[in-house]
Image: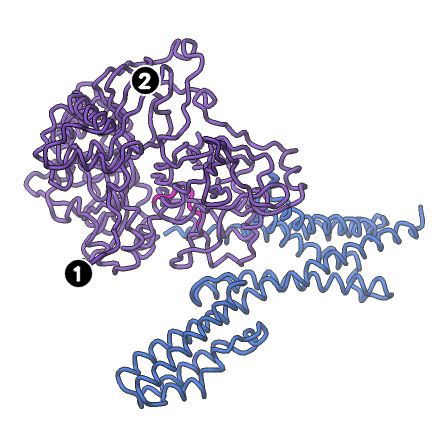
Amino acid sequence: MSTELTSPSIPQRWDSPFDSLLAPEIIALLLQDAPLPEELPDEAGRALQMLIRVKSAPALAGIDPTRFPQHLPLDGILLNDARLLTKDINEIIIREGDYGNSAFVILRGSVTLIADNLPAHLLGRGSRERKGFMAMVKGALRRKGDPETRVHHTERFEAGSDQGDAPSIFLQDVPRVLDGSRTHTIHAGEMFGEIAALGRCPRNATIISAEANTEILEIRWQGLRDLMSFAPEFKEHVEDRYRQFGLRPLLQGLDLIRRLDPAHVETLVQETRFERHGRFDWYGTYQKLLSASSAADRLRNEPMILMESDYINGLMIVRGGFVRVSHSHHGGEKTISYLGMGQTYGLTEILHNHAHPDQVIPAQHSLRAIGYVDILVIPTHLVEECIIPSMTPSEVAEHSRPLRTQRETNDLALTDHSSLDARDRLGPGMMDFLMDKRTINGSAAMLIDLDRCTRCDDCVRACASTHDGNPRFIRYGDHQEGVQVAQACLHCHDPICMIPCPTGAIHREDTGEVVINDSTCIGCSSCASNCPYDNIQMVEIRDEHGLPQFPSHHEQDGERLNLFSEGSLKRATKCDLCFDQKAGPACVRACPHDALQRFDMQDIDSIAQWLSR
Amino acid sequence: MAVSIKFFVKRRLANAALLLVTGVLCVLLWRTLEAALRPQALYSGFALLLLLLLLTAFNARKKLPFLPLLRASHWLQFHVYSGFLSVLLYGLHTEFRFPSGTLEISLSLLFAIVALSGFVGLYLSRSLPPLMARSGEPLTYEAIPKFEFRLRREVEDLVQTTEKSSGTSAVGDLYLQHLSAHFKPRSVWASLLGKPKKMLSRALENIDKVQRYTGEDEHEVLEKLRACVRQKHNLDIQKGSQFLLRGWLFVHIPFTYSLLITSFAHAWIALVYTPSR
């Protein structure tokens, strides 16, 4: 009798290589310690050649493979977390405004970066216009049929849930488009797209292939993260590029730096340090953590950025993510505030120490990473040399209030002083709640004042009326101190749902709303799985007779092939903030009791004001 | 120290002031028309009918949420304060005398029902939400029976398991004699009239009484029972409150339409039989 035990296989990170054409067995063959067989399968030979070429590209050439741990070899990362793309001339590689989780290295050919905004139709984006008066009346008069009916449904994309299967989009009328536009050519060996991939911000330019058969290596963020961790030369390369292209505009966007002379700005650009804290993929685990641990444990699990009573080494600027600001309180920690993108910490202490060198004080609060945080640190001596001399007396006075008062009123963010009282009014319980539930990520979170809400559901009915009879949110959700956060899309500042969308159907409108383009959604449910708040629903769509819709069948080698073997067609649906309605979100307008409001969670002033009406 | 007046207080004061001014103007106008020997009853009647139409338009606004017709909260404010004004106008129109005749009595009765139900609705809309918010988990009305059933089953399972494991009947007896009625799903009327607060304290007292006769293990069970009793209390509060918050509209709206139809009939009769000057 066999004594061998069998156990269920646990999914591994590299079960699905990024390049769907590269079989895991081939990758395993190439990664084995033993010498490769003389007769290699064609596929393995091609992959091997790719590896050699990739590793000789300037962006990756200097990487020392011995620095990588055995379970994460460099070759493994390149074979599993990267893939080769061949782009035709004028084919769009990345579009301005899209969210992406990949960086690109050009292996052969060149690409053109277009820095100017291009019209949506040129980028293959279907633009929806706001509904006119007659269209709204017609929509209301139309007989309400079955839920989720799509009468004029057209299948634009029929298969595939992998980015590799996404349709190609070509920029049309290129000479005219590029005429007068700010462009830049990126040549073979160079890298692009890493700033958006690592900072989880939208792409800030459109890039098209400048030559036919341009070969590009696409590296997904998991691979990028590991390369950054184990290859200091690669990290340095990425940071140099960020310093060159991303940091200057960001610093110049800050009030205190905008006014500095170019020489000082250049010094700051060169000397600013980058810090990353927390898990890039926090959204995968935070709900489990939330249910399985106490508030104190959760706080302890958040990576410490700066400990209260540590010396402040520099002015900290939040580049991405959220930071919890707390201070010790009766043996525990009291959360008093949070900082988001563009907010800063540390100026008050630096000002104090600059003015009183004999009475140096440490940090007055602890800073912790909520999820994932990207921080820029301007060293203290540069703040003293470049920034403080340019501050007006009133600014200095504003940031130099007695520290004890600040400790009580609690905020040091130089960009957000008006929120001092507001944060106090919200109280630590509400602050903790908003941070633990990650509601702070919302740019249009639906808050319901339970002291005023009569549960009449007018908001839900209004939502349904404006969406062909299908409500796009649930009046249910977590609550704290009489405030409920309804299950409606938060339109996140960091929209994680957009990252895996293979067709870019889920996107952010120019006006900020995160919306799904129904005609390009292929129903792969990647966005719904990625939404940490469960605010995206997959729905079965129906035809005008109320019957479920099925995908078209295709002939392949004489056999009928059903591309969607799982069943009927589905679409991702969620609150779109009534972006096509002239009057704005119907839910807010429909509430007769002023109980429902949408909030940008960075605007704590407005929330506090609303709560203490 | 300057005291900042809260938004809702400010709004209430402003609207009340506006209502007072409008009311005084209406009375003055009435007196002027009376002095000028004008048909003030006819004018006030039409003003009242117009006001009734505007008040009813609030319901139409709710049905057309997609139209940019101001926020529903603005409409509600107008609805509430115009409702108060309509009572004054009605008094002026009828010259504050007791109605006579079938049509007049019907109209007055309908008006009284609509106005009274409106005031009751306003009171409920302002007083019940804070009560629900503080009683516990916010629940959807339609889901409450499911929660009641689930809670009762959980409690019964807990009691049975405890009886088996402890070998004593203290917890079982407690449930059968004192708690089973508390966990029984109640009708909304029973939830409303059954004095839920009193039932809660009585159930908790009964648990306290049994605690002295039970061991450490059972104390934990009793603690769980206390939590369940509080959950049931919340369910009763949610059910009763939400029923009232929905129920008053079933009086207010149908009677409003009846009032409107009767008012049109009254206006038509008044126009037909008013002697022309």
- The color chain B is rendered in: blue
> Dot 1, how many residues are within 10 Å of its Cα: few (below 14), some (14-19), or many (20+)?
few
Task: Judge whether residue A445 is colored magenta.
Answer: yes
Q: Amino acid at mark 1?
A: Thr
Residue B173's disc number = none
What secondary structure is found at the residue carrying circle 2?
Answer: strand
Point out the stretch of residues depicted in magenta: A441-447
Asked if residue A391 is positioned above or below residue A529 in the image, the reply reads: above
- The answer to which of marks 2 and 1 sits earlier in the sequence is 1
Of the pair A512 and A155, the residue shown nearer to us: A155
Q: Is residue A119 left or right of residue A204?
A: right
Is there one chain holding both mark 2 and mark 1? yes
Q: Dot 2, how many residues are within 10 Å of its Cα: few (below 14), some (14-19), or many (20+)?
A: many
Chain A's colour is purple
Question: Looking at the image, is A474 positioned above or below residue A128?
Answer: below
Pair 2/1: label in front: 1
Would residue A533 be found to the left or right of residue B266 on screen?
Answer: left
Left or right position of A49 against A438 = left
Establish if B173 lies above or below B81: below
Amino acid carrying label 2: it is Leu
In the rendered structure, the residue with mark 1 lies on which chain?
A: A
Residue B51 placed where, x, y %? 72, 50
Please tell me whether residue A340 belongs to the stretch shown in magenta: no
Q: Which residue is mark 1?
A: A3
**How far from the left and from the top, in percent, is residue A414?**
26, 37
Residue linked to disc 2: A113
**Mark 1 and mark 2 in contact (Cβ < 8 Å)?**
no
Horizontal and vertical percent position of residue A147:
58, 47
Residue B275: percent from left, percent from top: 94, 50
At 26% from the left and 35% from the top, the residue drawn is A221
Kindly state the secondary structure of the residue where label 1 is placed: loop
Q: Is residue B49 visible?
A: yes
